[in-house]
């Protein structure tokens, strides 16, 4: 895995270790695509050393970001309830909440 960054002013594409934060002109590439990368005619590709031997363990920042995402999902207000006696079309009685393509399901014990 590597991050591709363009330096338009220098007509250079830089391929290096995965970025720790998102930037507008950075793209993460898998190993296969980072090896096969070519740049437009007239551009230079700078390949920075990527250490693939060390398995990266989650950092404190990674764990904090995950915890923040879980807290944010928990704060999402539940969807509006349908009128009593009427179920929403295609509604799952076990579904409690939805966020994008993810669903929160009621425990079968409750």
Image (cartoon, rainbow, N blue to C red):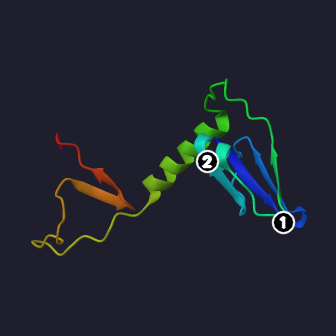
Percent x, y for residue 66?
54, 43
Q: Please state the total of marks drawn on the protein image.
A: 2
Q: Quadrant of the C terminus?
A: top left
Percent x, y for residue 61?
66, 39
> Mark 2 packing: few (<14 Cα in 10 Å), some, or many (20+)?
few
- Please report the residue visible at 43 percent of the width from the left and 61 percent of the height from the top: 76
Residue, far right: 10
When asked about the image quadrant of residue 93, the answer is: bottom left
Above or below 37: residue 99: below
When asked about the image quadrant of residue 27, the answer is: bottom right
- Please report the residue visible at 72 percent of the width from the left and 62 percent of the height from the top: 25
In the foreground, 51 or 87: 51
Whether pointer 1 and pointer 2 mark residues with C-beta atoms closer than 8 Å, the reply is: no
- Please tell me which of labels 1 and 2 falls first in the chain: 1
Residue, far bottom: 83
When asked about the image quadrant of residue 9, the answer is: bottom right
Q: Which residue is mark 1?
A: 8
* Circle 2: element type: helix
- Please report the residue visible at 24 percent of the width from the left and 56 percent of the height from the top: 95
* Circle 1: element type: helix
- Please report the residue visible at 12 percent of the width from the left and 73 percent of the height from the top: 86
105 to the left or right of 9: left
The dot on residue 88 is: none
Q: Quadrant of the N terminus?
A: top right
Residue, far front: 41
Which of pointers 1 and 2 indicates the residue nearer the eye?
Answer: 2
The dot on residue 33 is: 2
Residue, far left: 85
Percent x, y for residue 83?
17, 75
């Amino acid at each position: 895995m590597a991050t591709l960054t363009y330096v338009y002013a220098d007509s250079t594409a830089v391929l290096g270790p995965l970025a720790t934060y998102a930037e507008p002109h950075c793209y993460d590439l898998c190993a296969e695509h980072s090896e096969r990368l070519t740049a437009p005619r007239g551009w230079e590709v700078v390949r920075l050393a990527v250490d693939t031997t060390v398995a990266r363990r989650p950092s404190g920042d990674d764990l904090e970001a995950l915890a923040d995402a879980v807290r944010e999902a928990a704060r999402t207000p539940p969807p509006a309830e349908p009128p009593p006696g009427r179920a929403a079309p295609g509604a799952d009685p076990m579904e409690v909440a939805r966020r994008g393509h993810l669903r929160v399901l009621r425990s079968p014990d409750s």
